[in-house]
Image (spheres, rainbow, N blue to C red):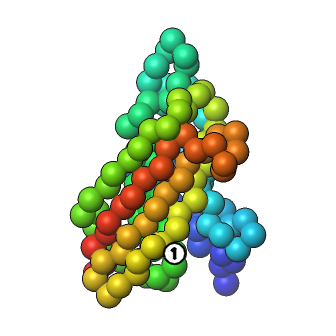
Amino acid sequence: MMDQRDQLEQLLDQSPYARLIGMQIDVRDGQLEFHLPFQAHNIGNDQLPALHGGLIGGFMEMAALMHMICIRETDSVPKTVDFSIDYLRPGFARDLMAVCTVTKHGKQVANVQVSAWQESPDKPVAVARAHLLLD
């Protein structure tokens, strides 16, 4: 029988994008936490250097989708209806973490807030809102 960590890794393995960016998922203090290890090819601004904004947004959207798959205990992948992101500070060339909070979980639609940070959860790099259509 697979433990929870094996199930989470198997879930990520099913997503080509999650594999491409090196996304990881873990459970800390009973909450899903998403991790994006630094990789040089994820740099978007060589001058700072900083992570590409599209990478940060894609990571956060993937976190919202994976979060809903995990809490619903289904293989059904929600469909993104709307995704809005606020970039608050540069995502420097280091690891990025994210957590999700479900603000509405109906039968057909879910709203998820995502916060991504590097130094501290109190200093987010970006925050996002995802509206997802559930199967």
Please provide percent x and percent y for residue 110.
36, 75
Position above or below: 94 against 57:
above
Please provide percent x and percent y for residue 39.
57, 32
The answer to whether residue 48 of the structure is visible from this angle is yes
Secondary structure type for disc 1: helix
In the rendered image, which quarter contains the N terminus? Answer: bottom right
Find the residue positioned furthest to the bottom. 107
Find the residue positioned furthest to the top. 47
Q: Classify residue 5 as left or right of residue 108.
A: right
Q: Which residue is mark 1?
A: 70
Q: Say how many tags the image has.
A: 1
The residue that appears at 49% across and 44% down in the rendered structure is 126
In the rendered image, which quarter contains the C terminus? Answer: bottom left
Please provide percent x and percent y for residue 118.
64, 40
Crowding near the residue tagged with mark 1, few <14, some 14–19, many ≥20 C-alpha atoms within 10 Å? some
The answer to whether residue 39 of the structure is visible from this angle is no
Find the residue positioned furthest to the right. 29
Residue type highlighted by circle 1: Cys
Q: Classify residue 1 as left or right of residue 76.
A: right
Position above or below: 66 against 110:
above
Closer to us: 132 or 113: 113
The residue that appears at 75% across and 69% down in the rendered structure is 29
The residue that appears at 44% across and 24% down in the rendered structure is 44
Please provide percent x and percent y for residue 127.
48, 50
Closer to us: 46 or 22: 46
The residue that appears at 32% across and 55% down in the rendered structure is 83
Q: Classify residue 105 as left or right of residue 89.
A: left
Position above or below: 11 against 104:
above
Q: Which quadrant would residue 36 be assigned to in this image?
A: top right
